[in-house]
Image (cartoon, rainbow, N blue to C red):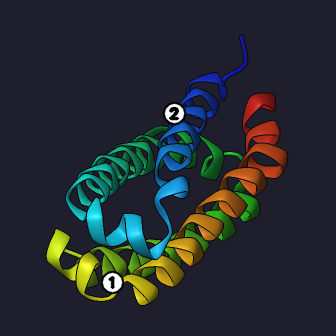
């Protein structure tokens, strides 16, 4: 069992949650199912928050203690600040189902951007960060 297995499993859960939201990113669904979408995004945001806390407490602390991988861990952790800021702003902008329904085009574009950033980050962690973590 690799050290990163728990994080990879969490990524799998996050991507499954994204998979339930993605088909609803059209104007009609965003308007008609805004309460469902809002609840799904809330669950996703809570799961992301939990995942990031565990990474900060365990993964980054261990990696930053090892001079061979410290620079990579520092870079990934710094980059995460921008993603957290974007996610917080996004969640504030669409804090209610009514906010989603009132601006479906903006909501769809913003959601696609956030989900792309999340997917890109997961791919980078799994291909670059976690293999290093597994060697510790």
At label 1, counting other C-alpha atoms closer than 10 Å, the crowd grade (few under 14, some 14-19, many 20 or more) is few
Relative horizontal placement of residue 118, taking residue 49 as reference (left or right): right
**Image point 67% across, 52% down: which residue?**
122
Residue 68 in view = no
Whether residue 97 is situated above or below residue 127 in the rendered picture = below
Relative horizontal placement of residue 112, taking residue 45 as reference (left or right): right
Whether residue 106 is situated above or below residue 37 in the rendered picture = below
Task: Give the numbered dot on residue 117.
Answer: none
Q: Which of the pair 26/119 is nearer the observer?
A: 26
Query: Does dot 2 land on a helix, a strand or a loop?
Result: helix
Query: Does dot 1 land on a helix, a strand or a loop?
Result: helix
List x then y, in percent, for residue 78: 57, 74
Residue 3 in view = yes
List x then y, in percent, for residue 66: 70, 46
- Residue wearing tag 2: 13
Q: Which of the pair 16/49 is nearer the observer?
A: 16
Instruction: Name the image quarter holding the C terminus.
Output: top right
Q: Residue furthest top?
A: 1
Instruction: Name the image quarter holding the N terminus.
Output: top right
**Image point 28% across, 64% down: which residue?**
32
List x then y, in percent, for residue 128: 83, 51
- Residue wearing tag 1: 89
Q: CA distance from mark 1 to mark 2?
A: 23 Å
List x then y, in percent, for residue 53: 37, 48
């Amino acid at each position: 069992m690799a050290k990163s297995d728990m994080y990879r499993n969490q990524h799998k859960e996050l991507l499954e949650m994204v998979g339930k939201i993605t088909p609803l990113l059209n104007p009609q669904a965003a308007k008609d199912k805004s309460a469902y979408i809002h609840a799904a995004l809330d669950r996703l945001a809570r799961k992301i928050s939990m995942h990031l806390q565990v990474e900060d407490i365990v993964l980054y602390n261990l990696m930053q203690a090892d001079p061979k991988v410290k620079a990579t861990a520092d870079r990934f952790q710094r980059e995460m600040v921008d993603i957290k800021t974007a996610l917080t702003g996004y969640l504030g902008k669409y804090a209610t189902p009514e906010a989603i329904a009132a601006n479906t085009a903006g909501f769809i574009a913003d959601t696609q951007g956030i989900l792309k950033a999340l997917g890109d980050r997961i791919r980078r962690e799994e291909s670059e960060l976690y293999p290093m973590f597994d060697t510790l």
